[in-house]
């Protein structure tokens, strides 16, 4: 993602659609690794007795709010 953003600021400044499509590549890898890691943790927790595990939360509620807020704040600042 850093490489795509750096290229967008320098060489590919006028190619917004291309940079948008290129940003899907790191997003795909990050999302796939997150899903694989969560599946591995859930499979590991399956081995524990049910009485010890009350529930499982990956924390996406707060991270979604914070991520959206950071995105909004970064769009307000033109120098970012």
Image (cartoon, rainbow, N blue to C red):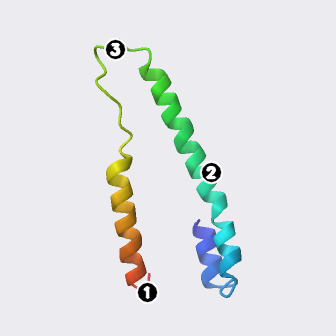
Q: Position of residue 32 (x, y in %)?
A: 60, 45
Q: Of the residues under marks 3 and 1, which one precedes in the sequence?
A: 3
Q: Which residue is mark 1?
A: 79
Q: Of the residues under marks 2 and 1, which one precedes in the sequence?
A: 2
Q: Secondary structure at mark 3?
A: loop
In this view, the mark in front (3 or 1): 3
Image position of 80 with respect to 33: above or below: below
Image position of 3 with respect to 60: above or below: below
Instruction: Say which quarter of the image contains residue 33.
Output: top right
- Indicate left or right for 29 with 41 as reference: right
- Indicate left or right for 48 with 17 as reference: left
- The residue lying at 39 percent from left, 84 percent from top is 77
Q: CA distance from mark 3 to mark 1?
A: 51 Å
Q: Which residue is mark 2?
A: 29
Q: Of the residues under marks 2 and 3, which one precedes in the sequence?
A: 2
Q: CA distance from mark 2 to mark 1?
A: 28 Å
- The residue lying at 65 percent from left, 80 percent from top is 16
- The residue lying at 35 percent from left, 76 percent from top is 73
Quadrant holding the C terminus: bottom left
- The residue lying at 64 percent from left, 61 percent from top is 24
Q: Secondary structure at mark 1?
A: loop
Residue 50 disc label: 3
Is 4 or 52 nearer to us in this picture? Answer: 52
Q: Position of residue 65 (x, y in %)?
A: 34, 59
Is 56 or 37 nearer to us in this picture? Answer: 56
Query: Disc 2 vs disc 1: Cβ atoms closer than 8 Å?
Result: no
């Amino acid at each position: 993602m850093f490489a795509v953003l750096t290229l967008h600021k320098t060489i590919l400044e006028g190619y917004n659609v291309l940079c948008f499509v290129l940003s899907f590549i790191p997003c795909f890898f990050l999302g796939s690794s997150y899903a694989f890691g969560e599946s591995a943790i859930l499979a590991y927790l399956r081995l524990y007795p049910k009485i010890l595990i009350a529930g499982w939360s990956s924390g996406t509620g707060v991270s979604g709010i914070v991520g959206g807020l950071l995105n909004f704040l970064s769009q307000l600042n033109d120098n970012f």
